[in-house]
Image (cartoon, rainbow, N blue to C red):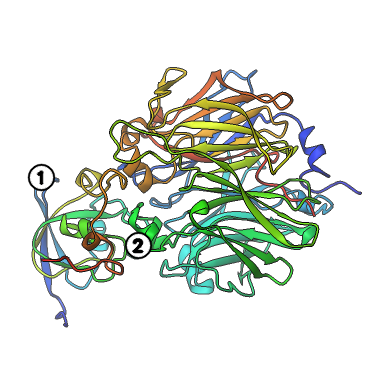
């Protein structure tokens, strides 16, 4: 799937007064937003460490390069900004205030087999 | 022996060194929601000083998101007879960023300054490594364990730096069949290094999924290396007794073959030694029982994330991060440890919610013991993502450093009532402290040839 040169999308930051930014479809969201002055947390910058996770509430991203999220976190809308690229206009909640469902006590709230990371998850039985 | 290099001629000499007056601990903002760099804090630990028990200096790293964690010296007692060396530089790896920060602590010990940064991307390009953890000096050179390759996949390997902090490439000749990396310690007189296993950076950095233990994403083996050949020669499968074997410590006595490992999830101490027939053996010597909790469906494991051996090799200290206790065992007979001290600070069991007036978030985590064995400094944060899972209130409350008075003669521990450093009150907001080191050497830095 190719992305044509110059393709841009609008990112709305729901928990920053619905500020909007135009971003390049070929660049990681973290880089595009930081370049425009948005103060965002980050760590490894290759999709492995979850520090930059944000919650996607509308639209879609391509985050195939991320290896940090389990399937429950993905189903809860989390995206890894250092590798995610927009494929439509999107709305995000950013920063740790969006991390309400990102962290969970693993003993009190275990994952089901289909909620594990992609490499060890088994398909959900229906 | 001519004595003009760093450190001490022997463990017995180290014990007689002057009392520590400063200590350094890392403090993180990574993962806390505060957009500031992690930093190296200098703590005044001189009881005669007007700023005793306070942070007196903060050296910020150049960027955000490093997650400083463990650190190590450029030189230790392994170059005691090398007059060209000195214990001047502290190496601070960023687990997430892969950057190595070289900090000059000698020019002004109270106000360390940044000497050099080895760029994480350069390490990935030249050595295919990420996720740095333990730093040891190797005579005049330095080796650092990394838990992953450049993509964050296990087992990683060891970065070799020369004394000018230039990348020499990989230290090891082979990783053999080792699945994971973490901590290591070596005992040159027996030509042995022992290494332990956490997990791949891509597994542990985002947080702890318990199910991944069952899927063999976390370690359960110890590895014995031919130190001169730089290759593993024997692995010990610890099984259920050794789930997530983290810190490894040899006796400080360079002639001893005895060593210890804390298995974090099993909350056991594993003891190893070489028997009379020259074979390496291991046994479980301490088993911390899981504790019931009114809100938990299963008993709470201790999570023994660190161990430490006193410089006289008489006491072993361990933490139970989720329970909230620090323990002291007399290991004069390493096969039969005797519990001689226990104190509570934080934890999930509610046994010590406050220490010296400070509300605790987290539990006892990393600790550093004075060379004379009398003062144990303990911090409360494990790792940002894991803190956020088990102790989410640490975001607002920050980490704490506590001092425990230890009796090195008769055994016993007691929380010192005059000392506490509350990182919840830091100028830029609550930060979290982890590993600590002393400028003159401590109980986790020195190896004797």
How many numbered discs, if any? 2
- In the rendered structure, find residue B439 and report the number of the disc placed on it: none
Earlier sequence position, callout 1 versus callout 2? 1
Q: Residues within 10 Å of mark 2 (few under 14, many from 20)?
A: many
**Residue at figure coordinates x 41%, y 62% from the top left:** B217
Q: Residue furthest right?
A: B1
Q: Which residue is depicted at the point 56% across and 58% down? A: B196
The residue under label 2 is: A48
Kindly state the secondary structure of the residue where label 1 is placed: loop
Camera-nearest residue between B233 and B339: B339
Query: Counting other residues with Cα less than 10 Å from the Cα at mark 1, is it few (<14), some (14-19), or many (20 or more)?
Result: few
The answer for how far apart the CA atoms under marks 1 and 2 are is 29 Å
For the residue pair A113 and B449, the one nearer the viewer reads as A113
| B177, above or below B380, in the image | below
> Where residue B342 sits in the image (x, y, percent)?
56, 27
Q: Which circle, 1 or 2, is nearer the viewer?
A: 2
Circle 1 is placed at which residue position?
A17
Residue displayed at 45% across by 48% down: B265
């Amino acid at each position: 799937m190719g992305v044509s040169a110059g393709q841009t999308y609008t990112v709305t930051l729901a928990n920053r007064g619905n500020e909007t930014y135009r971003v390049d479809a070929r660049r990681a969201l973290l880089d595009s937003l930081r370049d425009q002055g948005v103060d965002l947390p980050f760590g490894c910058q290759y999709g492995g460490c979850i520090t930059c996770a944000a919650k996607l509430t509308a639209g879609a991203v391509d985050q195939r390069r991320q290896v940090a999220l389990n399937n429950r976190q993905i189903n809860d809308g989390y995206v890894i900004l250092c590798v995610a690229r927009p494929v439509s206009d999107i709305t995000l909640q950013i920063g740790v205030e969006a991390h309400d469902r990102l962290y969970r006590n693993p003993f009190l709230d275990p994952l089901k087999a289909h909620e594990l990371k992609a490499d060890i998850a088994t398909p959900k039985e229906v | 022996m001519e004595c003009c290099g760093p450190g001490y001629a022997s463990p017995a000499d180290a014990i007689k060194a002057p009392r520590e007056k400063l200590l350094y601990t890392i403090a993180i903002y990574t993962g806390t929601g505060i957009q500031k760099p992690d930093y190296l804090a200098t703590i005044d630990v001189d009881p005669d000083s007007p700023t005793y028990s306070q942070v007196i200096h903060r050296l910020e790293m150049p960027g955000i998101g490093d997650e400083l964690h463990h650190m190590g010296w450029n030189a230790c007692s392994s170059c005691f007879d090398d007059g060209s060396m000195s214990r001047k530089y502290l190496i601070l790896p960023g687990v997430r960023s892969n950057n190595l920060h070289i900090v000059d602590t000698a020019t002004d010990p109270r106000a360390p300054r940044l000497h050099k940064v080895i760029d994480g991307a350069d390490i990935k390009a030249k050595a295919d490594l990420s996720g740095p953890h333990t730093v040891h000096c190797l005579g005049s050179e330095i080796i650092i364990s990394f838990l992953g390759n450049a993509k964050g996949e296990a087992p990683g390997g060891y970065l070799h730096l020369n004394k000018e902090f230039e990348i020499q490439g990989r230290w090891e000749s082979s990783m053999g069949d080792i699945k994971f990396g973490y901590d290591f310690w070596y005992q040159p007189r027996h030509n042995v290094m022992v290494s332990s296993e956490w997990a791949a950076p891509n597994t542990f950095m985002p947080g702890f999924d318990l199910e991944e233990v069952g899927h063999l994403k976390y370690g359960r083996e110890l590895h014995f290396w031919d130190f001169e050949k730089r290759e593993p020669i024997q692995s010990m499968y610890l099984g259920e007794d050794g789930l997530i074997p983290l810190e490894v410590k040899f006796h400080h006595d360079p002639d001893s073959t005895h060593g210890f490992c804390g298995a974090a999830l099993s909350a056991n101490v594993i003891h190893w030694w070489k028997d009379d027939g020259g074979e390496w053996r291991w046994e479980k010597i301490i088993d911390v029982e899981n504790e019931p909790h009114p809100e938990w469906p299963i008993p709470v494991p201790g999570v023994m994330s660190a161990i430490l051996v006193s410089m006289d090799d008489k006491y072993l200290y361990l933490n139970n991060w989720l329970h909230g206790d620090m323990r002291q065992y007399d290991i004069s007979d390493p096969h039969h440890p005797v519990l001689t001290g226990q104190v509570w600070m934080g934890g999930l069991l509610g046994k010590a919610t406050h220490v010296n007036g400070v509300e605790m978030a987290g539990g006892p985590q990393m600790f550093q013991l004075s060379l004379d064995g009398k003062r144990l400094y303990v911090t409360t944060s494990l790792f940002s993502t894991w803190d956020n899972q088990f102790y989410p209130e640490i975001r607002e409350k920050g980490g704490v450093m506590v001092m425990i008075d230890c009796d090195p003669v008769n055994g016993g521990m007691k929380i010192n009532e005059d000392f506490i450093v509350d990182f919840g009150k830091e100028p830029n907001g609550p930060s979290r402290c982890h590993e600590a080191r002393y400028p003159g050497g401590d109980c986790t830095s020195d190896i004797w040839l």
